[in-house]
Image: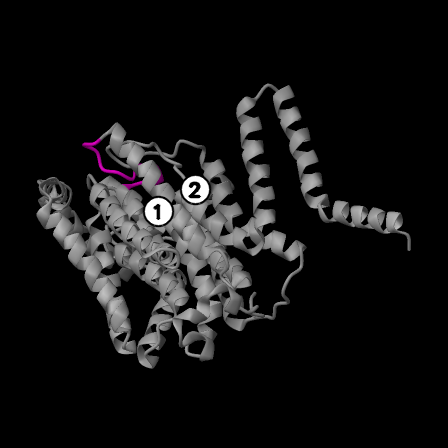
Amino acid sequence: MSSERAQGLRGYASLLGRWPAIFAGAILVGLIGGALAERKPSTAVLICIAIGGVIALAMLGERAFPWAIVVVAVAPWYPLVAEQAEAPIVKQKVLCAAIAAAPLVPWMWSLALGGRRTRPSRGALLMAVLFGAMALLIYETLGSVTKVIDSKVVGYVFAGVAFLCARRFGAGRGWLAAAFGGLALLALVGAEAYVKAPSHRVGYFVGYPITYGALVVGLAPAALLFAYQRSRLLAGGLVMGSAALLIFSESRSSWVASVVMLIVAVLLQARAGNYKALASVGAIIVVLTGLIVGTGSLTKIVEQKLNPNITRSQSFTHRQWSYGYALETIGKQPLFGAGAPGFSAEEAANRTSIGAIDNGYLSITVDMGFVGLIAALIPIGIALRVLGRCLRLGITPRYELALALGIVGMAVVTIFYDSFYWAQIDLLLGAMGGVLSVRLRTVGSESGKAPVRIRRRRWRPIRWAI
């Protein structure tokens, strides 16, 4: 074969290898032209973002899944500065479309492009049937598709969808970088919000400051591992920056979650005999304590942001009412509840001045009964199983622990907050739990006993996903 002919064949092969991007680009140009011709610039912008995002996800490969989940979770869908929870700045159908696309688009790209073979999983099949039944129950209760297109409803259902889709990406590539990028975006937008309104709580742009705190504690362990693998100084700065974010959000439940995560991490490191890691944790605690105590301005900020204020008595009274109402309602409808997420919030708003139950587990049980609660607890149960196995065997696989601790942090916040009403938290819980469900089988094996086993060069394809 002549060199000219060989070069021509290589050119054709290169062109065929790039055909998806070329095809997508042609569609992008056509749709933008059509939208502009229709004189709807906003439609053109949405089309650009949507198709550009799909192309970017296709180019990322398996790393697209965690990036899609994290970007949708931390994006500023709500007003930057507020004094109470407000409606999103985009239409509900746009927000719900983004929530649905985050797990489904990378999953469908992965199916279309082939990749690893999968085999059925009875547990995953049962979970799919369970969430499918929950979706049908919600539709029958609400009575129309229009009412189903709500971020509370879609977020709850897509917690299960994200869990099942994540099982195809069990290798977990991209989670650490995505968590670090998501935390950086939360910090940047939070800084802008603080500069514009220093007297306000930070975090309304993701729905509510406690939602902001839950996202921080959920992403922080994986982001910290990403930073630590590159620079201890960067890791230390990340810890102090995360602490500042929680202070300015006034999310006391997130501080409780951080303490629980720290205690669990110390127990695991002590059980494994990793005294060097324990020394690093101790150094971080000493530095943070020294900064808070030794810096007058920082002490003032902490006292102002975290000290209980005049609304404490109102919050305490509301929590007492919430627990009594929830337990009474659950006793009347224990199996399937009211049949729709958000019911308890509406009842609380009608009967009190606060539209929440202040406990996510009670809220979802009132709404969906014990069946719905069990479905929502599956990712948390996977994380607890990972931590229990690590504690029993005295091992500390860093990657699995980072995801498990993030889930535990969000689960602790849920004790004080209606976390399942926020699709951002639902997506993170479901996706992290799905990855852990695949990697659970390797925890305790030879590849899970030493933390260095998680390095990219050591990863091997896991041929078990839905």
- Judge whether residue 261 is colored magenta: no
Residue 212, by quadrant, is top left
**Which residue position is annotated with label 1?**
342
Q: In the depicted view, which residue is nearer to us: 306 or 244?
A: 244
What's the residue type where badge 2 is placed? Asp
Q: Position of residue 235 (x, y in %)?
A: 31, 54
Residue 423 in view here: no
Q: In the depicted view, which residue is nearer to us: 342 or 398?
A: 398
Residue in the picture at 22% in, 41% down: 248
Colouring rule applied to residues: one colour
Residue in the picture at 35% in, 48% down: 421
Q: Position of residue 271 (x, y in %)?
A: 27, 77
Residue 298, by quadrant, is top left
Image height of 451 relative to 310, above or below: below
Range shown magenta: 198-208
Q: In the visual, does 385 lie left or right of 305? A: right
Q: Earlier in the sequence, mark 1 or mark 2?
A: 2
Contact check, label 1 and label 2, Cβ < 8 Å: yes
Marks 1 and 2, how far apart at CA = 10 Å
**Which residue position is annotated with label 2?**
150
